[in-house]
Amino acid sequence: MTDDPDFLLRNAVDALPEGALKAQLAEGRPLRVKLGIDPTAPDIHLGHLVVLRKLREFQDRGHTVVLIVGDYTARVGDPSGRSAERPVLEPEQIDRNAEMFKEQAFKVLDPARTEVRFNGEWLAMEMEDLFRLARTATVAQLLERDDFAKRHKANEPISILELLYPLLQGYDSVAVDADVEIGGTDQKFNLLLGRDVQQAYGKKPQSILTTAILPGTDGTRRMSKSLGNYVGITEPPEEIFGKLMRIPDEVMTTYYELLLDAPFDPDRPAVESKRALARAICAQFHGQAAATAAEEHFDRLHVERALPDEIDEAPMPSGDPVHLPALLREHFGVSAGEGRRLISGGGVRIDGEQVADLDIPAERLAGAVVQVGKRRFKRFVTP
């Protein structure tokens, strides 16, 4: 086992208590490095990749990752960074999401060095045990959390269930004997509270490591599927490539630092840096051949056909298949009859390819650019 504290700490925002992780690594034993995820959505996007890459770095140095699937805490909903209570999903949906998330996480993590646990194993506790857990923190302490503090000041409701969430997450660390817990900067309060919960149960407290939050493809808000500014790792390579080519220039340094091992070259043309990023991400999850094909597809669509730099976006229509004349009528102001004539005459293209069918699969339209004639374009995105 080769420990490299400086490498493991690179790109970390917080490493607390100061010097704790270096001291743990100096012990020369495999550490149990914990990540908790609530399967409220099934797909992993590049925002998740930041912390998963850090976990893989620990694995590559001989440490064990404990991936806690929050099948129980997902029923509560993590309020971190939220201004309102999160809706609760049905147990069956949570279970399906958890299985898909685990399968996708193994595209980054080494299964042989990953211990997967579901916190329903220990959180379905007796009332007496819940009372003991509740005594490990005060309401005043929990209200110090930034999101709770803002909602409390604004007289917005905070449920007792939400207040319990950080304690339940902290108890996860007790149950799996976590040495280190990793999370985004929005998790800092929860991770530190986990230390207090461990100490209350007579456990040695974990050290914590927080990672930066990746901005979404809009360059401003955090990457999130609900905001529509995400890049999913299981999306088609053409979709991944196209999305990464559209990220703002000013976030390129952050994307390189958090997603790639290669340094960002500020003197390189932005478009070349984006191409290199898009190729690398496509190759990681789909292979080099698919990455090359995705770039060729992008060039056919955007370079050879000289599409405009700015293309209006529209939400994907409901239903599958999509009736193309109806789509043209709603989004391009084309009558049904004119739409049929355009289609039959080769005047409608999807991602640069002429369309002859009146009904098309919804998956073909997702993220694609529809072109009507020579100058009308619209990209259809999932809300």
Image: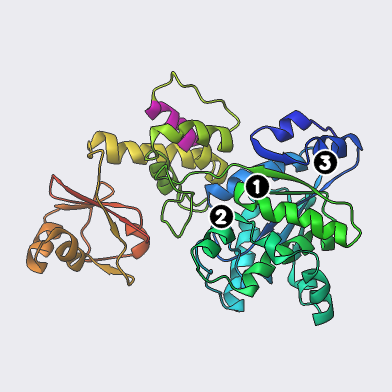
Which quadrant: the N terminus?
Answer: top right
Q: Residue 259 versus residue 362: which sits nearer the camera?
A: 259
Residue 360 included in the magenta stretch of the image = no
Q: Residue furthest bottom?
A: 127
Q: Which residue is mark 3?
A: 62
* Disc ID at residue 347: none
Determine the CA span between mark 2 and mark 3: 25 Å
Does 60 sit above or below residue 94?
A: above
What's the residue type where badge 2 is placed?
Ile
Mark 2 / mark 1, whichever is N-terminal: 2
Q: Which residue is mark 1?
A: 52
**SS label for mark 1:** helix
- Please determine whether, in this image, residue 240 is positioned above or below residue 10: below
**Residue at the spot 24% in from the left edge and 50% down from the top edge:** 312
Confirm whether residue 41 shows in the render: no
Amino acid type, callout 3: Gly
Q: Earlier in the sequence, mark 2 or mark 3?
A: 2
Give the x, y percent position of residue 193. Answer: 74, 56
Residue with the mark numbered 2: 44
Q: Does the CB distance between marks 2 and 1 fall below 8 Å?
A: yes
Percent x, y of residue 64: 81, 48
In front here: 239 or 211? 211
Q: Which residue is located at x 58 percent, y 63 percent? A: 79
Q: Which of the 4 image quadrants contains residue 97?
A: bottom right
Query: Is residue 177 in view?
Result: yes
